[in-house]
Amino acid sequence: MKPRNRKSNVPSTKKNKKKNQGHDDFFESAAKRRRKAALDEAIESDDSDEDVFGGGGERENAEDADEEVEETADEKRVRLATEHLERIRAIAKKIEEEEEEEEGEGDDGRERKRDSLVAEILQKDQLEESGRVRRLLSSRVVEPQPEDRFQVLIKHLQPVTAVCLSEDESRGFSASKDGLIMHWDVETGKKEKYLWPSEEVLISHYAKAREKPSEKRSKHVLTLAVSSDGRYLASGGLDRHVHLWDVRSKEHIQAFHGHRGPVSCLTFRQGTSQLFSGSFDRTIKLWNADDRTHIDNLFGHQSEILTIDCLRKERLLTAGRDRTMRLWKVPEESQLIFRAPAASLECSCFINDSEFMSGSDDGSIELWSMMRKKPTHIVKNAHPSTINQDIPLENGIKEAPQENGKNKNGLTCSAAQSWVSSVAVCRGSDLAASGAGNGTVRLWALEPESRGIHPLHNFPLDGFVNALAFAKSGRFLLAGVGQEPRLGRWGRNRTARNGVAIHPIRLKEEK
């Protein structure tokens, strides 16, 4: 079944053609580019758009109009594309200056060389974005310095259950068990709260009325997801609804009802407004955030669905307590079933369209390929419980691993501490991370075709790591931490701090 979009997002051709005149000189002839050298210098400045589209006398009026008229989605895409092209040109120019120029090469030859270099960089970016080529980040990760550690960025009163990051890596979102949803700036840590509307407003937004009016509606949030264009934030929790929020105004705009159990996981399909939700009622629902409509249901899991993930293709990855992970081909209405070898899968995520990664409640991490029904590689005891603080390990981490729940002195601890509760992969790369409740977040290097996984570094972090989010650039890692696990109270760490922590990742310059 192919979802149908009821609204067309295709911009007006005449409008865009007129708007883009003077911007895309990349495809013009060399003679025209030389005549527009002065204009190119103006484009690289911060206020170039006003200079091109308006005269000096009308500049102040244009700025006032920009403050009053909000930038549309089409205008934002044009602006971001122009800025990206300018950055690529600057990189190509820098590379060209560093290389030795051939003797007798004129201006036309240098421009052709620069244009071909820009095209090569753009092609490489497109292949990496589509997942056809994997970025090799793990080999560029520098060993952490003593000052490189997790720093608490945002504090919550209750354990954090979900963390997600915007496409441009500038904004983050987090939610906790007390129903608090926060929107914050990654660089400054400045935060804003999403205020829940009254019961009357929720019902007017199509929320289902409570069976017992005397009972309060639960605001316990279990999952978050943000759309690729940054317009929508979706939340789900114990009230069995999928709530849609406007990121710009921080206001509640829609409540999707239909699930008969808590909504445990959400994901937006990249580049679209399609939203998938998984629930304890064993069903998956597909929604359209733009049209505010329900599109389809997917059935197959025999127990609660715990995690869900989606890339650009209409393929969906889910894991549940029925010890299965399922790859859904939405248009074909078919699914591939992958069974865990010995334990229940707690989390999973895509590496690319045909490879994925999962974590289990027995403390193991698995790598999967679409071509095999069993894991291609398993790392057992990936997060052993830490009790004896006198046993040192490399990178300054102290562990006592022999068997999950035990240390070398025979002391026991909560088995929930060794559960792999979250996994994340830096999009389009070979760099992954996993978290548990043993006081450590581990960084992993993935081999091609899921042939293996190797530990890189251990990052100390006290508490249950209920969510992980990688920056697309690989420059930092976000962790949602709590004193308790995301879906229950099987363990408790009273010394942990509830909140969102950030850890920098230093990368060597790419050759």
Image (spheres, rainbow, N blue to C red):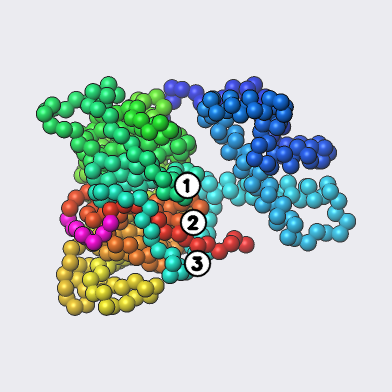
Instruction: Identify residue for label 2.
Output: 475
From the top left corner, tell me how far across and down residue 321 is, in percent.
Answer: 22, 49
* Residue 454 is at least partly visible in this image: no
Decide which of 329, 209 is in the foreground and name it. Answer: 209
Q: Which residue range is magenta in the image? A: 490-497
SS under mark 1: loop
What residue would you read off at disc 3?
A: 142
Q: Position of residue 307 (x, y in %)?
A: 30, 46
Q: CA distance from mark 3 to mark 2?
A: 11 Å
Q: Residues within 10 Å of mark 3 (few under 14, many from 20)?
A: few
Quadrant of the image for the C terminus? bottom right
N-terminal of the pair, mark 1 or mark 3, is: 3
Q: Mark 2 and mark 1 in contact? Answer it, CB < 8 Å.
A: yes
Residue 57 lies in magenta, yes or no?
no
- Residue 495 within the magenta-colored segment of the rendering: yes
Q: Amino acid at mark 2?
A: Arg
Relative to 476, is 288 above or below?
above
Residue at the spot 38% in from the left edge and 58% down from the top edge: 151
Position in image of residue 38 (x %, y %):
78, 39
Which residue lies under the disc numbered 1? 169
| Helix, strand or loop under label 3 | loop
Q: In the image, 392: left or right of 248?
A: left
